[in-house]
Image: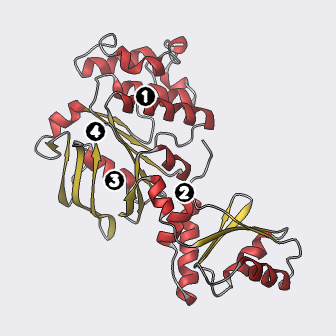
Amino acid sequence: MSIAMITAENIVKNYGSVKALCDVSFEVLKGEIFGIIGPDGSGKTTLIRILTTLLLADSGSASVDNMEIVSDYKKIRSRIGYMPGRFSLYQDLSVEENLEFFATVFNTTIKENYYLIKDIYSQLEPFKKRKAGELSGGMKQKLALSCALIHKPSVLFLDEPTTGVDPVSRKEFWVMLRRLKEQGISILVSTPYMDEAGLCDRIALMKDGKFLRIDTPDNIIDQFDDTLWAASSSRMYALLNDIREQEEVLSCFAFGDAHHVTVPKGTLNLETLEENMRAKGHSDISIKPVRAGIEDCFMALTGRGSGDAGKTDRGNADREMKSCRKDPV
């Protein structure tokens, strides 16, 4: 039987009239990478701060490594690793001094748990005398992860750890997370990058303080039941608006060099849509079937509707996706 290392039940948090978290419930299993995927402002950071005992929930309960987040907060802080979204180490201390400081705080030594950070810290050692504030974004990320791991935590919390980091460093970072998972560390990671969802064991799609769906990335994609096409022409902005005016279209949003178009199965066919677009002056229209990704599933969960209300919903969903960063790993 899998052991739940994080359990949250009906977590609620409000900031005045703003509902940051609305009855959030989930669990993270031992040795699992659990991703919270959603745009900026969806509640990811608030949830992580509650679980790391830095913020009190208005209601609900949660436990980390079988310890209750309110009554056992001191014990939890000694058993978890936490990487906040903003680099928060001592910028005037060197790489080596930062790591030694955090090891001392947790009554351990670099030597004792070096095996945990060896793959990460080996890339930092040539710069160990350099001040943390002078490191590149990717190196700062590696130092922060090393400091979060030096006391051998059972659970690791990562709040948007790859934001603002170059694609190569992002890829390296996720390779490191898979190695940590193999050592039995449970990892809760939040990210606005939809492409990182497929690197997690399970994900929660989050919007407006709510979990829309929790499942494996493959299961979420397999549950996409509509027809999906990629459409392009030389007049992309006009194409976007013209496709959205089609009655059968559920959603249409910009996706790289094409527009992703969603229609219910058995309604509009590809040839008819092409003819309709040619009639609107798109002589070089190209429409082809594509397989859904996490972005498409997120849009399906947030942008459904019909009639005028549906057009408003699609516009809101587009704005959500613009705040979800897409940068291939």
First in sequence: mark 4 or mark 1? 4
Kindly indicate the quadrant of the structure image that contains residue 209: bottom left
Q: Nearer the viewer, mark 4 or mark 3?
A: 4
Q: Count the marks.
A: 4
Q: CA distance from mark 2 to mark 1?
A: 27 Å
Kindly indicate the quadrant of the structure image that contains residue 248: bottom right
Query: What residue lies at 79% left-to-right and 78% top-to-bottom?
Result: 274
Amino acid type at image mark 4: Lys
Q: CA distance from mark 1 to mark 3?
A: 27 Å
Residue hosting label 2? 324
Q: Is 32 above or below relative to 239?
A: above
First in sequence: mark 2 or mark 1? 1
Q: Are marks 1 and 3 in contact (CB under 8 Å)?
A: no
First in sequence: mark 2 or mark 3? 3
**Is disc 4 placed on a helix, strand or loop?**
loop
- Nearest to the observer: residue 187 or residue 51: 187
Residue hosting label 4? 30
Amino acid type at image mark 2: Cys
At label 2, counting other C-alpha atoms closer than 10 Å, the crowd grade (few under 14, some 14-19, many 20 or more) is some
Q: Nearer the viewer, mark 2 or mark 1?
A: 1
Residue hosting label 3? 46
First in sequence: mark 4 or mark 2? 4
Residue 80 in percent (x, y) is at 27, 34
Q: CA distance from mark 4 to mark 3?
A: 22 Å
- Nearest to the observer: residue 91 or residue 282: 282
**Is disc 2 placed on a helix, strand or loop?**
loop
First in sequence: mark 4 or mark 3? 4
Amino acid type at image mark 1: Arg
Q: CA distance from mark 2 to mark 3?
A: 17 Å
Q: Is residue 239 visible?
A: yes
Q: Nearer the viewer, mark 2 or mark 3?
A: 2
Residue hosting label 1? 179
